[in-house]
Amino acid sequence: CSRESSATRLRVTNMPPVDSNTLTPRELETMHATKPKSKEEIAKEIARSRYLYPKHVEVVRDFEPFVDKTVEDILLETGESAWQPQDFLPDMEREDWVEQLKEFRGKADCVTDETLVVLIGDMVTEEALPTYQTLLNTFEGCDDPAGDTPNAWARWSRGWTSEENRHGDLLNKYLYLSGRCNMRKVEETIQHLITSGFNPGAAQDPYRGFVYTSFQERATKISHGNVAKLAKKNGDSNLAKICSMIAGDEGRHEKAYQAFCDRVIERDADGFIEVFAGMMKGQIVMPAELMTDGCDPDLYTNFADVAQRTGVYTAIDYADILEFLVKRWDLEHMTGLSAKADEQRDFLCRLPARYKKLAERSMNKASKSPEDVKIPFSWINGRAC
């Protein structure tokens, strides 16, 4: 054994040196395959490795010019051309501010406690805006890393936030000036909600983020629009005008996010369908789900019950929004999908009817049950509704 090893070593040692200038075709092919990458290619690979969803990031960055146009066409200019909360409130600089305030309060006195509760719940939701901007900045490829980044996505995020900021500001001032609610408890609720945050299940994925915002902006538009109808019915034309204006903003924002989804579908229909179906297999999380006033652990549920009873936002609305989105993106006629995506598309097309049936059954059951137990709300000094 030892002699064989010595012989082997001898043979290896005595082999002639390899001619480094002579390469076989296979060796040449291997060298070409492992050719050093350019600095640009290396930089691109490093950038891609930073993301959980590199393909999704490439897609959303591909339609940045459209986002740039959307900022100009859909978001209002700041300054004189944009409405501001003060446009709808008594002017405390005027000499007749007392008369203005009396007239303002006189109309607010007509608003029922039920309308007040849903209005306060909507206002608390709007005032948690810092949470929502933080969420936008988690969507890969759509963030604002420097805080004043000049690209289209960062400008959209800041512009959207600046418009949304007016909503909570205006509703908060309305409630304060109305003298109808316990502002300290309302403020505690706002602080609790921002502290608690919320997780819509977007998981940093821009596709998921766009599906969520497409749904949620429409839901918010419906809610504010229905509060406007209640306010008009109650006799407060000021509140009706305020809520209608806010609903209009939400409607424009809804169209923008749905248009972003259009651009995703053009570039990656399979990926979009997979994300949309995945989100709808769960439940769209409402942004105020973790609200509390520090007293009522079921505050959100109780607020949502009042919204359901008053018709401000119902289970039927949820099903209707889903049906609208399925039609808006024309899922029924979508072609060219993979077998898996096509199966998920069928699931989404059937889902609205299923949700609507469940919602109708639930509402019919509620209408036949004994009269609802009224719950006291700290927001309105313990009055029950």
Image (tube, grey):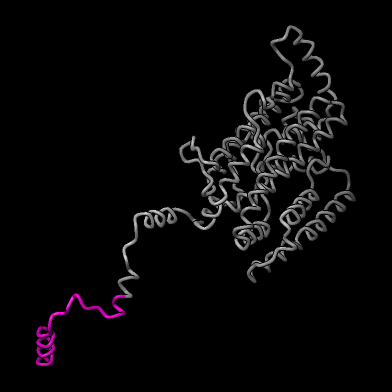
Direction right: furthest residue: 368
Quarter of the image containing the C terminus?
A: top right
Residue 269 position in % (x across, y down): 63, 61
x and y percentages locating residue 178 in the rendered image = 76, 21
Q: What segment is highlighted magenta in the picture?
A: 1-28
Residue at (81%, 56%) from the top-left corner?
356
Label count reads: 0
| 61 lies left or right of 262 | left
Q: Nearer the viewer, residue 166 or 126?
A: 166
Q: Position of residue 140 (x, y in %)?
A: 52, 49
Q: Is residue 89 left or right of residue 206?
A: right
Q: Residue furthest top?
A: 95
**Would you identify the image quadrant in which residue 380 lies?**
top right
Against 148, residue 210 (above or below) is below
Image quarter in which the N terminus is found: bottom left
Q: Quadrant of residue 162?
A: top right
Looking at the image, can residue 195 be seen?
A: no
Please check the rendered image and state whether residue 8 is part of the magenta-colored stretch, yes or no.
yes
In the rendered image, the vertical position of residue 18 relative to residue 82, given as above or below: below
- Residue in the image at 76% along x and 8% along y: 96
> Can you tell which quarter of the image residue 255 is in?
top right
Q: Where is residue 195 drawn, in percent x and y?
A: 57, 37
Residue 347 vs 57, above or below: the answer is below
User: What residue lies at 53% left-to-right and 50% top-to-bottom?
Assistant: 61
Q: As rendered, which of 157 and 242 lies closer to the eye?
A: 157
Q: Is residue 271 magenta?
A: no
Any part of residue 64 in sight: yes
